[in-house]
Amino acid sequence: MAWSETLAAMLSGGDRRSIGRSAAAVKLVLRQPARFGELMECLSGENPVLRMRAADAAEKVSAKKPRLLDRHKAELLGLLARAEQIELRWHLALMIPRLRRTAPERQRAREALEGYLDDRSSIVRAFALEGLAGLARSDVALRPEVKQLLRNAVDRGTPAMRARARKLLEQLLD
């Protein structure tokens, strides 16, 4: 399969203040889902701009086509545990709940996302709450713990965390 432009080339260049051609990459992968693997390869690259933009695109594609994540589950769970880049962490926190997970994989994901609650970035912490709420939607046993984390965030979190936690609590109480 020959493609005129690689996703890595499409997403490279510039700096982390811009998502560059991420929207074009999303449209392309939605039209050509076979290229999702190419996008996933970019998440492990050396270039932080490429990782950030690929994570943004992968998260947006997976919001519309979550089953594209399934064949990359092991890679995503590994990245979730070891990612240090803020932008990668917040996008992974949103993608992980979209995976079909076994009980041990849910446990790994929960532990990693709980670790994100200590991140220096308020955005990562807010998205970790969202990821944990996503896990709790499909795992009833996890709901009491996640509801308590959300209540704690409402009481003591940053403004972004408080707002996100209030919204997530409402959704989990429905």
Image (cartoon, rainbow, N blue to C red):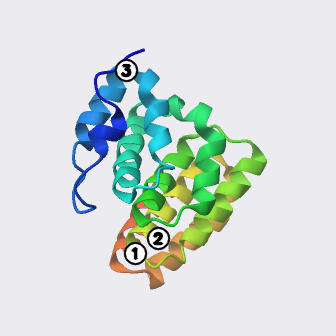
How busy is the neighbourhood of tag 2: few (under 14 within 10 Å), some, or many (20 plus)? many
**How far apart, in angstroms, are the residues tagged by discs 3 and 1?**
34 Å
Residue 174 lies left or right of residue 54; in this view the side is right
Closer-to-camera residue (103/174): 103
Query: What is the quadrant of residue 120 in the picture?
Result: bottom left
* Image quarter hosting the N terminus: top left
Residue at 49% from the left image edge and 53% from the top image edge = 92
Residue at 23% from the left image edge and 35% from the top image edge = 24
How busy is the neighbourhood of tag 3: few (under 14 within 10 Å), some, or many (20 plus)? few
Closer-to-camera residue (170/145): 145
Q: Which numbered disc flags the more N-terminal residue, 3 or 2?
A: 3
Residue 84 lies left or right of residue 105; in this view the side is left
Q: Which mark is residue 145?
A: none
**How far apart, in angstroms, are the residues tagged by discs 3 and 2?**
33 Å
Q: Nearer the viewer, mark 3 or mark 2?
A: 3
Q: Dot 1 lies on which element? A: helix
Please say whether residue 136 is visible from this viewpoint: no
Q: Dot 3 lies on which element? A: loop
Q: Are marks 3 and 1 in contact (CB under 8 Å)?
A: no
Residue 104 drawn at (x, y percent): 78, 50
- The residue lying furthest to the right in this view is 104
Q: Are marks 1 and 2 in contact (CB under 8 Å)?
A: yes
Q: Which mark is residue 32?
A: 3
**How far apart, in angstroms, are the residues tagged by discs 1 and 2?**
5 Å
Closer-to-camera residue (78/158): 78
Q: Say which amino acid is labelled 3.
A: Gln
Q: Which numbered disc flags the more N-terminal residue, 3 or 1?
A: 3
Q: Which residue is mark 1?
A: 122
Q: Say which amino acid is labelled 2.
A: Arg
Residue at 27% from the left image edge and 30% from the top image edge = 27
Q: Which residue is mark 2?
A: 125
Residue 55 lies left or right of residue 147; in this view the side is left
